[in-house]
Amino acid sequence: MTLTGSGSAYDPPADPAPRRSTAPVPARVHQYGPPRRLDRPVALVTGASSGIGAATARRFAMDGWHVLLSGRDRRRLEQTASGTSAVVLPADLAAPEGPRLLAQSALHATGRIDVLVAGAGMGWAGSFAAMPHTDIDRVLTLDLNATLHLVREVLPSMIAAGRGRVVLLGSVAGCVGLREEAVYSAAKAGLAAFAEALRQELRGTGVGVTFVVPGAVDTAFRTRRGRSPDGTRTGLLSPGCVAGTIREAVRQNRDEAYVPTWLAVPGRVRGLAPGLYRRLLNRFG
């Protein structure tokens, strides 16, 4: 696994007296396992009800982090939290106030957020000309807009603390553009540009940005986005593999991580030789 970027290992130091938020007490916040220890670093993971988000949350919890789990499905969040000290914070990030309310609840629960893993997302596959306008809006809202708004809500507390890391989950679709996934590709490309721009803005603040680009992952997301299962899982990544990459990227303060590492190649070919890239794409899909 090849990761790019620079920086020393990132495991935030203990904060014996974390600041408390003045946000209103969130409704029905549930904690599982032993009483939480706020001397541990805190990770907020969205999309934690299944797939990559759930695997990432478990990985951070296994490493001793205090984990805040967010998603729309409370029952699945509780399953992810089972056996850990995680706090469940159900939220609909596509709702107008969703990102703000989640950030308030998270900061009220722990007083700080050391790492935000923005894993919530959805997809849609099919002809763009036939894509309903409502679905265009839904994909862009959840995959791009909601993520930006959530980062905007969480970032001030990280900057004030002088430490933190934002992890954004991209896709190879955003690097090269995939036919019949035009809007999803656009949303993920937007996240890639946002990650780069934000990283430059945050230089010198102690807050970093990691952009993770996985290939095809064996999750229910593949079915929900509109593509029928092809009957084989050969070559698919496991959610745990991606979660492990995310954890190591955070530990080492990496700027980018591709899973598998060769996924960095198509985007570079596209940038250096767009004509060749398109000929290869037309031939091999």
Image (cartoon, rainbow, N blue to C red):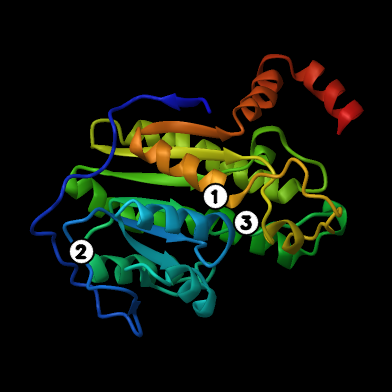
Q: Which residue is drawn at 46% across and 76% down?
A: 78
Q: In this view, does 260 lie to the left or right of 151?
A: right
User: Considering only vertical position in the picture, is 161 above or below 223?
Assistant: above
Q: How many marks?
A: 3
Dot 2 amino acid type: Gly
Spot occupied by residue 280 in the image (x, y as percentages of width and height): 84, 23
User: Which is nearer the eye, 89 or 145?
Assistant: 89
Q: Residue furthest toward the left?
A: 17
Question: In which quadrant of the rendered view does residue 164 lie?
Answer: top left
Q: Is residue 145 left or right of residue 67?
A: right
Spot occupied by residue 269 in the image (x, y as percentages of width and height): 70, 19
Q: Is residue 123 left or right of residue 88?
A: right
**Residue matched to label 1:** 240
Label 3 or label 2, whichever lies nearer to me, is: 2
Dot 3 amino acid type: Leu
- Please tell me whether mark 1 sits on a helix, a strand or a loop: helix
User: Which is nearer the eye, 166 or 11?
Assistant: 11
Assign the C terminus to one quadrant of the image. top right
Spot occupied by residue 80 in the image (x, y as percentages of width and height): 48, 68
Mark 2–mark 1 distance (CA, rounded to whole Å): 28 Å
Q: Residue at x 38, y 34 (%)?
A: 199
Residue 111: which numbered mark, if any?
2
User: Considering only vertical position in the picture, is 158 above or below 266?
Assistant: below
**Residue matched to label 3:** 140
Q: Compare marks 3 and 1 and give the one earlier in the sequence.
A: 3
- Please tell me whether mark 2 sits on a helix, a strand or a loop: loop
User: Considering only vertical position in the picture, is 123 above or below 106?
Assistant: above
